[in-house]
Image: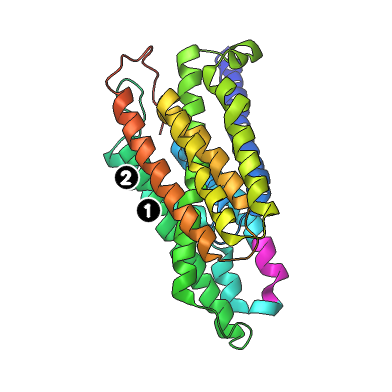
């Protein structure tokens, strides 16, 4: 009888072991797929992969972080091998290091000292923005280091390239890319915690969704079309700056959740108007958008703390 019980326990432990490995493989595969999608719409001053990276680090338990590193590392190693002959071995080594590993070194001690969520489940916006800025700087440093290794292997390939200019462009791109995705993911999580379940009917009844679909997105699409259609730089710049209005109106009506959704829409619409790399006018508008979204998130989160919270959701397991 004892022998049979021991066999059953070993079988159960083996099943649990393989189930845990299966979860890691699934997370690595899903992250790798999402990373590839976001990487193909990323450029120097709009790095959407930074948002995916930060959202996963903030919401997934730390035991799954190695799977994230594998999921990001495999595409990077593949790309490094393909371009090895073009940029050299030093570049390949630098390009093979997953950016998410560096961000882990910033996010982990920060979350160990300050939780992302308050005891009643609200987002600590100061922690979120600090994590966003720190990861943006690390992303820029690592990307510039990889760029320098490529320049060393082919010094005449980009004679007019300014490394400091690219560094600040990468900081802006990683910061704005994180603001594009991460706050929206956290807002969706908070709304799901409050409602308990999400259905199409509940989504359709959402005032935020109605405002977003009814006037915010059409306004952003019209402004993006205006910026692309005009040949006058001043009109293009005005159209980009007017994209801030839907962000501010959604923030006024729906708090930081509205800021998150409006900021994502404005960031995508503004990025769609990019015609040349490192366009100074485009970068100026993106800097203003980053400051406006950051400020509105802080103000909205502070205002939400004065209101009673419907539920007290549990914080994610770390």
Q: Which mark is residue 198?
A: none
Which residue is located at x 58 percent, y 54 percent?
235
Estimate the x, y position of residue 123 in percent, counting from the top left.
36, 30
Task: Magenta stretch: give its range.
Answer: 77-84
Q: Is residue 203 magenta?
A: no
Label 1 SS: helix
Quadrant of the rendering where the N terminus is positioned: top right
Q: In the shown orientation, is residue 61 left or right of residue 160?
A: left
Q: In the shown orientation, is residue 98 left or right of residue 22?
A: left
Asked if residue 29 can be seen in this view, the reply is: yes
Estimate the x, y position of residue 42 in percent, counting from the top left.
61, 55
Estimate the x, y position of residue 20 in percent, counting from the top left.
58, 33
Q: Nearer the viewer, residue 183 or 97?
A: 183
- Pointer 1 residue: 134
Question: Cβ–Cβ below 8 Å for labels 2 and 1?
Answer: yes
- Residue extending farthest to the bottom is 156
Which residue is located at x 40 percent, y 18 percent?
313
Magenta stretch secondary structure, dominant: helix
What colouring method underlies this structural image? rainbow
Label 2 SS: helix
Label 2 CA crowd tier, 10 Å (few <14, some 14–19, many 20+): some
Between circles 2 and 1, the one closer to the viewer is 1
Label 1 CA crowd tier, 10 Å (few <14, some 14–19, many 20+): some
Q: Is residue 296 above or below residue 102?
A: above
Q: How many marks?
A: 2
Which residue is located at x 45 percent, y 15 percent?
194
- Mark nearer the N terminus (2 vs 1): 2
Specify the quadrant of the image occupied by residue 95. bottom right
Asked if residue 105 can be seen in this view, the reply is: no
Q: How many angstroms separate mark 2 from mark 1 (CA)? A: 10 Å
- Pointer 2 residue: 110
């Amino acid at each position: 009888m004892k022998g049979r019980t021991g066999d059953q326990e070993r079988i159960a432990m083996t099943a649990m072991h393989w189930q845990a490995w299966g979860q890691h493989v699934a997370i690595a595969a899903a992250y790798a797929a999402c990373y590839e999608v976001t990487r193909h719409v990323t450029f120097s001053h709009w790095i959407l992969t930074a948002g995916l990276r930060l959202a996963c680090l903030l919401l997934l338990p730390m035991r799954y972080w190695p799977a994230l590193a594998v999921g990001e590392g495999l595409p990077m190693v593949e790309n490094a091998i393909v371009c090895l002959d073009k940029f050299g071995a030093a570049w390949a080594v630098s390009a093979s290091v997953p950016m998410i590993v560096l961000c882990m070194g910033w996010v982990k001690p920060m979350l160990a000292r300050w939780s992302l969520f308050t005891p009643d489940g609200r987002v600590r916006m100061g922690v979120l923005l600090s994590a966003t800025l720190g990861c943006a700087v690390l992303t820029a440093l690592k990307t510039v280091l990889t760029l320098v290794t490529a320049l060393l292997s082919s010094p005449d390939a980009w004679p007019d390239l300014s490394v400091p200019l690219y560094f600040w462009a990468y900081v802006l791109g990683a910061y704005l890319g994180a603001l594009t995705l991460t706050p929206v993911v956290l807002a969706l999580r908070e709304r799901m915690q409050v409602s308990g379940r999400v259905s199409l009917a509940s989504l359709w009844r959402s005032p935020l969704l109605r405002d977003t679909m009814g006037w915010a997105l059409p306004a952003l699409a019209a402004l993006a079309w205006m910026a692309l259609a005009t040949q006058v730089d001043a009109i293009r710049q005005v159209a980009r700056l007017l994209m801030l209005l839907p962000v501010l109106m959604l923030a006024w009506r729906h708090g930081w959740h509205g800021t998150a959704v409006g900021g994502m829409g404005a960031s995508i619409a503004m990025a769609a108007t990019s015609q040349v790399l490192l366009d100074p006018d485009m970068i100026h508008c993106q800097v203003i958008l980053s400051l406006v979204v950051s400020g509105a998130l802080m103000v909205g989160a502070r205002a939400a703390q004065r209101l009673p919270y419907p539920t007290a959701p549990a914080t994610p397991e770390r």
